[in-house]
Image: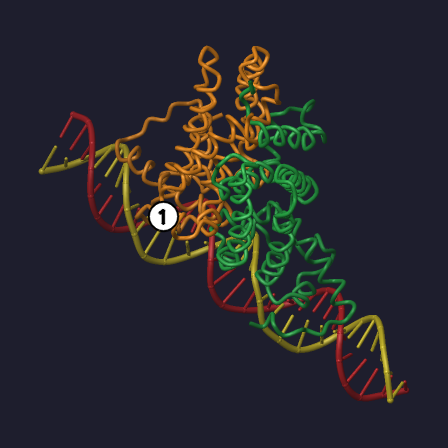
Chain colours: A orange, B green, C yellow, D red
Amino acid sequence: MESSVKPRRTRIQREKREIILEAALEVFSMHGFRGSTIDQIAEAAGMSKPNLLYYFRSKEDIHNTLLSRLLETWIAPLREIDAEGDPVTEIRSYIRRKMEMARDFPRESRLFANEILQGAPRILPMLDTDLKNLVDEKAKVIRLWMRQGKLVNADPYHLIFSIWATTQHYADFDVQVRAVLGPDRGGEGRFEDAARFLEQLFIGGLVPRG
Amino acid sequence: MESSVKPRRTRIQREKREIILEAALEVFSMHGFRGSTIDQIAEAAGMSKPNLLYYFRSKEDIHNTLLSRLLETWIAPLREIDAEGDPVTEIRSYIRRKMEMARDFPRESRLFANEILQGAPRILPMLDTDLKNLVDEKAKVIRLWMRQGKLVNADPYHLIFSIWATTQHYADFDVQVRAVLGPDRGGEGRFEDAARFLEQLFIGGLVPRG
DNA sequence: GCAAAATTTGACCGTTTGGACAAACGTTAA
DNA sequence: TTAACGTTTGTCCAAACGGTCAAATTTTGC
């Protein structure tokens, strides 16, 4: 593993690598790995192709760097779920945080979605270990809450999946969402509307109480 | 539009075109449009590349044919929602049908997801018209149900989105779902578990009644 | 100011890819 | 039988692509 040796980088190297990663995120999230070319990334980064390849050994190198940075920040909201907190508040906050990420980091969401769609060839090992362990841990917490009667009995894994799915949908399927909502309802308020709906759904469901 | 002229095809042409489309669905849904090669499709279809190009003018021609066939069958379950039926039963059935599609037609789901992720360059026109009109119509039905007090007041558009998101998640993010569930819980029963959870979620939410 | 190191670029290379084409092969019906 | 038509394949091509390299230029440390 070469990622374990700390590379010494100049100031320019640090800056240019950031510029490249930003450009690559833009391109990869739009066209996928195979659909993106080094030339596109180089142009988006405002430099020539050989120059870009001076900072990253290969196209895959860029992609791997993006992905390995991504996963940790991507699952951070789940990590924040507090076993000591109020269950309903914790779930609600988690949904809010995930929805904010869909709104503020749609490119990251799409990069991740692209990777999973293709069978997660590059990050499956991390899903099997890091992600699974975290979800296992939080599932235990949720199950405890259910046993205490704070939440209805349900499968905590599928609960987590449903929160991922509903929130990330607004980043990954944004084009479809805007097409269906139309110009009026499809404005910037859609994330707020969605968050409100999801809160209502997850807390109380659709059937009136009484 | 040349798709409006009815092409006369021989028996062999009809058969071979089906074989090619089946092979292309397999390849496209796994690697995306840009990530798939005509050679891969040809090999999966058991024929040479020039032979395949005898039946379809281009790679894009195959992809377009797949997509235009797909959208109609993909939204068929939504069309089946019956304004005269019992609201809770209708919603529940819709979730079931969508979940069955995620289980039985994951390749179609991924093909669709890939297209939307890339900005829907080929089917955006259909989303703006056909899909939007259908959703508008069903949203009206749902809103009527809400006004009648059969369902709680909520945004019907985001309700539909959340059903799409949660069900298709099990096809599009299958790799992640299986990684997180692990070998034990990740067996074929996961679709049944998911359907049960979603039914519970959409009907009653997570907070105990009383 | 200057030498060493870091950065940038134009030119180039091998491979992959989508697609064209003509020739060969098979089928059908008079 | 044979001519017309449908099908299949080997060969080829131009463009796109990932990546290399040596030379030119700029920056850095003394």
The residue identified by callout 1 is A42
- Above or below residue D24? Residue B8 is below
* Residue in the foreground of this view, choosing between B52 and B187: B187
D4 or A71, which lies in front? A71
Q: Secondary structure at mark 1?
A: helix
Residue at horizontal 47%, vertical 51%? B119
Relative image position of residue A35 (x, y in whole percent): 49, 50
Instruction: Report the side of A153 relative to A76 (left or right).
Output: right
Number of numbered tags placed on the structure image: 1
Q: Position of residue A208 (x, y in %)?
A: 55, 30
Q: Residue at x 71, y 74 (%)?
A: B8
Q: Position of residue A55 (x, y in %)?
A: 36, 38
Q: Is residue A130 above or below residue A181?
A: above
Q: Chain of mark 1?
A: A
Relative to A187, does residue B92 appear above or below in the rendering?
Answer: above
User: Of residues A150 and D14, which is closer to you in this image?
Assistant: A150
